Amino acid sequence: MSYRKWASVCAESNPNQKVGIRESSMNSLEFGKIRVLRIVTRMNVGGPALQIFGISTHLNTNQFNQLLVTGYCDENEIDFFDLHETSIAVLRIPAFGRSVGFLSDLRAFIAIWKIIRRFKPHIIHTHTAKAGVLGRAASMITFSRHKRVHTFHGHLLHGYFSSFVTKMVILVERFFAKHTDILISVGRRVRDDLLKVRIGEESKFRIVPPGLELQPSITRNEARMKLGLREDAVYFAWIGRLVAIKDPLRLISIAEICKKSDLPIRFCVAGDGPFFKELSKAALEDGLPIDFLGWQPDIENVLVASDVVILTSINEGTPLSLIQAQMAGKPVIATNVGSVSEVVQNQVSGYVGQFTDEEFAMLIEKLCKENSLRDEMGQKGHEFALRNFSVERLTNDHEEIYRELVT
């Protein structure tokens, strides 16, 4: 059976969605290679997609044969593969997506089960919560001999659900952790949070920080002209989806305080989401120094145009935007959540803490006035990020884990 025919059997066709994908023949598997089946719910633009793309692209093709199984993004999301070409094999399942639905999830489950039976992987590596449940559940009933790996890019323990739903999530994750060979956490804080609620055992966890590479970008002046930003302002960039867990509404209070200082402080918001209209309306009504850039396909341009990057999140895994900021030589001001303190060196490459709005504004004003401090922190952050968060290191870490499991 050809790959395309086999794919049509595994994944239901949907005339309203783009089906099919960047593919490679299933019959081209070479003897002796480690087969890795990677499963993620959707490849929306963000941290998990960037990490999966980096690993899959750089994995040693002489030793590994891989297939990525994923679904489709919601209408208000940007699909990573609409922006990035790739030579890796990718199989789409139309029923697979962010929303929870019994029938669609059942169809996705059956499709994943069929893919596992056909691909016969040595390793099944799941990413994100829903893919972790469906992928590991399907692998358990194939009764084939393979190893299971799951990556926690963050967790759903704080700020997402009611206490009852959170308890249910914990019970489900506990169950699947018992049936997983290796649990990967993007940071120590994320791992420790999971261990506190008895998800997994410490011996099963491997800490694998993110890995990135920045593409060459345009000059600062060119970036500001392209984004419509002012030449004479000191810009503090907020980057991410405008959703509750990122707490973008704090920007209103912080900007109101900074506005009173008469310093050339401006904020630029690169992102879209449910809070976009509310935030932009409040900023316009109060005459706040905030420029809304919307979603940006080239985050490097935003970083080059900015002077400092800020993060106001209530919960995070290991935020890639802060790693990208430091790679671009920008200092950071961030709330101390998730593994932020593992990414940013407090008072070295920026400031990390549980800041009040007033304290946040005070640090913004400090970095606005002290150009030399900005440069010094930016340089230290650049060196730290290149040393610890390269895509080569990320790929090597995964290759070592895969070899450990099959030898």
Image (spheres, rainbow, N blue to C red):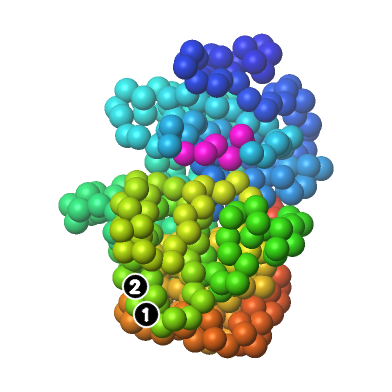
Front residue of this view, candidates 308 and 220: 220
Looking at the picture, does residue 305 appear above or below residue 349?
above
Q: Which label was assigned to residue 156? A: none
- Residue 78 within the magenta-colored segment of the rendering: yes
Quarter of the rendering containing residue 349: bottom right
98 relative to 144 in the view: left or right: left
Q: Which mark is residue 256?
A: 2
Q: Which amino acid type corresponds to the residue marked 2 in the rendered image?
A: Glu
Label 1, on which residue?
Answer: 260
Can the viewer see residue 35 in this picture?
A: no
* Badge 2 element: helix
Are there few (<14), some (14-19), or many (20+) residues within 10 Å of tag 2? some
Q: Nearer the viewer, mark 2 or mark 1?
A: 1
- Magenta span: 77-82
Q: Are marks 2 and 1 in contact (CB under 8 Å)?
A: yes
Q: Amino acid at mark 1?
A: Lys
Q: Residue at x 40, y 22 (%)?
A: 107
Q: Is residue 180 above or below residue 9?
A: below
Residue at 36% across, 64% down: 287
